[in-house]
Amino acid sequence: MRLGTCFLDQNKVTDSYNLDPCLRLDPVRKNYLLLGDSHAAALWLALSQSLPEVNVMQANVGGCEPTLHHSGPGLCRKVMDYVFQTYLPSHTVQALILEADWNSGSIVPLEETLDWARVHQVPVIVMGCVPSYDAPLARLLAYSVAWHESDLASKHLVQEDGILDVRLRAVVEGKWHVPFVSLYDSLCEGGRCIEYADAARTIPLMNDGDHFNPPGALFVVRRLVVNGELR
């Protein structure tokens, strides 16, 4: 995640941060900027490894949606103001990837951000909702093995994520004609999601309830690349 450098915890960092190494353009490769919160940070390494022809830059702040406007002072607002007001107007990127722990209140600010990107001719890719659970997935899977209850984790899947993901796709693709990558659809079907990052079913996709661990992130990103949804 590169916590403390390209992924900042706004509860621990005040003004002593420097994102310049995280936002350095590569003159040879395509340059993508991954902007968002901890859900975005969880994907950075997997994106970098799965897209070797791309320089995946990173500007992430915990609990901070990658949108244009943020009320009140704080690290989230400072970073997003810098990215949208200073960095992107003066640096050309081939894709701005927006990812966060989206909620129903995210849609309006996301639309404002997509409008800004269209005006400033910044190509955008929006990544949708991460399937989440109401308890740590690794723990649920351990219990499912111990109790011989194979569908235990699926009973704890937060169904609202799938509903919101559909709404986000309709807005992003249908209204703004911007590429939308559904993490949810890549893993879930019929109310049940892939839960392991390996064929042997020994490595959970997540340690907690809603962040991919490194093997889980690599699994889902490679799946998206193979299906042609990321390139």
Image: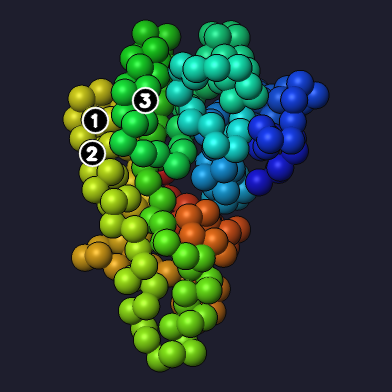
User: Which label is found at residue 73?
Assistant: none
Q: What residue did someone put label 1 on?
A: 171
Looking at the rendered structure, the secondary structure element under dot 3 is: helix
Left or right placement of residue 180 versus residue 67 in this view: left
- Give how far across and how far down residue 127 sits, in percent: 40, 40
Residue bearing mark 2: 167
Instruction: Give above or below for 119 relative to 109.
Output: above
Give the labeled residue for mark 3. 110
Mark 3 or mark 2: whose residue is earlier in sequence: 3
Let me know if residue 91 appears in the view: no
Q: Residue at x 29, y 51 (%)?
A: 160
Q: Nearer the viewer, residue 94 or 65?
A: 65
Question: Neighbour class for label 3 at 10 Å: few (<14), some, many (≥20)?
Answer: many
**Amino acid found under the numbered disc labelled 2:** Arg
**Visible residue check, residue 175:** yes
Q: Nearer the viewer, residue 103 or 116?
A: 103
